[in-house]
Amino acid sequence: MLAATLPPPIFAPPAPLKIVVEKHPDGYVAYPLGLARGVIVGQGDSYDEALANVRSAIAFHVETFGPESLAAVDDSPVLEAFVADAAVSA
């Protein structure tokens, strides 16, 4: 009798990805925070278009490099992200 072959385990990030969406004069740019390797970016004329494009780029990244490519830096996911103003003196 042959032993059953189990499919490889499915990688699941420990938490949903945090996506930054920036508004620029010529459109929107979106990217996930905290990836250990690689850069994934989406852009569009609207917030929704940029978010849809980065989701598509993330899916392509996973198809190309495997789901473990979304591992967070040191397996420590970004829990929250903040934006702050900071003055820099010259």
Image (cartoon, grey):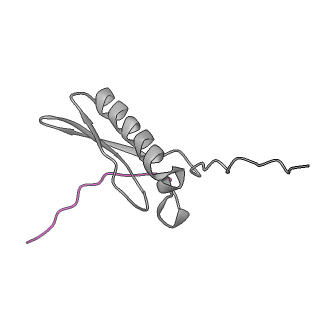
**Which x, y percent locates residue 60?**
41, 41
Q: Tell whether 62 sits left or right of 32.
A: right
Q: Tell whether 47 sits left or right of 11.
A: left
- In this rendering, is residue 43 above or below 41? above
Residue at left 44%, top 40%? Answer: 59
**Which x, y percent locates residue 43?**
25, 37
Q: Nearer the viewer, residue 77 or 10?
A: 10
Q: Going by the picture, which residue comes out furthest to the right?
A: 1
Q: Is residue 82 magenta?
A: yes
**Which x, y percent locates residue 74?**
51, 67
Total numbered circles: 0
**Which x, y percent locates residue 20?**
34, 44
- In this rendering, is residue 85 above or below 63? below
Q: For the magenta stretch, what is the residue range?
A: 78-90
- In this rendering, is residue 24 above or below 80? above
Q: Is residue 88 magenta?
A: yes
Q: Going by the picture, which residue comes out furthest to the bottom?
A: 90
- In this rendering, is residue 76 above or below 42? below
Residue at left 12%, top 36%? Answer: 25
Q: Going by the picture, which residue comes out furthest to the front?
A: 1
Q: Nearer the viewer, residue 89 or 49?
A: 49
Visible residue check, residue 62: yes
Which image quarter holds the C terminus?
bottom left
Q: Nearer the viewer, residue 23 or 73?
A: 73
Visible residue check, residue 78: no
Which SS does the magenta portion mostly show?
Answer: loop
**Quarter occupied by residue 44:** top left
Residue at left 17%, top 62%? Answer: 87
